[in-house]
Amino acid sequence: MKYFHAAILSLWIASLLPANASAKASKASITSVQSERAEFAQNFASAIERQDMEAISKLFDMDALATSMSKDMFDDKDEQAAFKRGFLSNGEMNLLRRMFGTMNNVTRAKFLRVLPDNRPLVRLDYNGGGHEYLLLHLREMNGKTPAVDMFTMTSGREVSKTMNMVGQLMI
């Protein structure tokens, strides 16, 4: 089974690579952006490994996640705003605990690399065996670059999409 997961991961990562050289920016800008993204991902992985929810809350923008989810679920601006208010009323720390609920089973979190599209890849190793890969979606906002979503390998989609699917069942 682990070979199947490795094969799927290899195909998935290969699909993220740019098709031609023109898709790449100048080497200097790639180095600078990738360096910033690598530092962010190292801090993110370290916070997960330490199970430090306070540090994770500074790195993950729940407001941006709520905005993205509301736009995916509703066309009407009032419904989007109501959903976002309700989502965030649960409290950022409670939401983060739910998103990272399996964190207490993580024995190691490691930043692997920044992919060519500048998204950092992090691997979580679980104490009972197995692992998860997180592809972080970062966005420059107000001089900061927080995570606004993440693709999880086990679900095969972004956290926002997974949460929206659950939400659609309740509407």
Image (tube, helix red, strand yellow):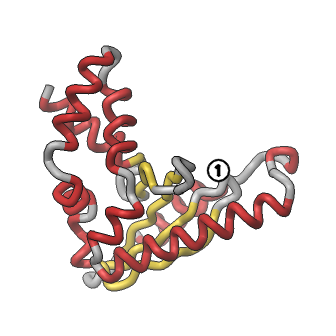
Nearer to the camera, 155 or 35: 35
How many numbered markers are drawn? 1
* Quadrant for the N terminus in the image: bottom left
On the image, the x and y values in percent for residue 97 come to 20, 62
Residue found 14% across the figure and 25% down from its top: 171
In the picture shown, does residue 37 fall above or below 151? below
In the picture shown, does residue 101 fall above or below 110? above
On the image, the x and y values in percent for residue 157 come to 41, 46
Residue at the outermost front position: 142
Nearer to the camera, 76 or 123: 76
On the image, the x and y values in percent for residue 153 come to 43, 58
Residue 168 shown left or right of residue 109 in the figure: left
What type is the residue that disc 1 sits on?
Ser
Residue at the outermost top position: 76
On the image, the x and y values in percent for residue 96 come to 25, 59
Q: Secondary structure at mark 1?
A: helix
Residue 140 shown left or right of residue 103 in the figure: right
Residue found 16% across the figure and 57% down from its top: 94
Residue found 32% across the figure and 18% down from its top: 77
Please give the residue where the numbered disc 1 appears in the rendered image.
15
